[in-house]
Amino acid sequence: MKLSVISYLVLTTLVLATVAIFAALGFSFDYIFFLTIIGEVLLIFSVYSVLSDYYNTDKKFEDFYEDHPIKKEEDKL
């Protein structure tokens, strides 16, 4: 089963948030260190997955934001 790129990002976020929670609650250093190493590997893999993902769009820079369209120079005249 192939996971999507967003799945890797969510998993990485959850692992690194767990590290922060464990550190705040005073868990054993072994658990925190182990999760930190796993989180760093997941972070590198997530960045690689995002950058190497095949993604095409037909949008152009002129389209800008779709939720708040701006007028083009031709439309202003």
Image (spheres, helix red, strand yellow):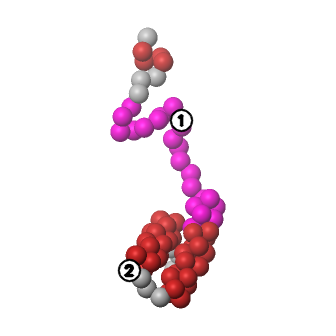
Q: Secondary structure at mark 2?
A: helix
- The C terminus lies in quadrant: top left
Give percent across and percent down for residue 64.
47, 35
56 magenta-colored? yes
Q: Residue at x 58, y 61 (%)?
A: 50
Tell me if I can see residue 27 in this picture. Answer: yes
Q: Secondary structure at mark 1?
A: helix
Nearer-the-camera pick, 24 or 10? 24
Mark identifier at residue 47: none
Q: Which residue of the protein is positioned furthest toward the left in this rendering?
A: 67
Q: Which region shows up in magenta?
A: 46-69
Q: Residue at x 62, y 68 (%)?
A: 44
Mark 2 or 1, closer to the camera: 2
Q: Residue at x 43, y 85 (%)?
A: 27
Q: Quadrant of residue 61?
A: top right
Q: Alpha-carbon distance for marks 2 and 1?
A: 47 Å
Query: Closer to the N terminus: mark 2 or mark 1?
Result: 2
Q: Quadrant of residue 67?
A: top left
Give percent across and percent down for residue 71.
42, 23
Amino acid at pointer 2: Leu
> Can you identify the residue that label 1 sits on?
61
Mark identifier at residue 25: 2
Give percent across and percent down for residue 6.
47, 65
Give percent across and percent down for residue 74.
47, 17
Nearer-the-camera pick, 56 or 10? 10
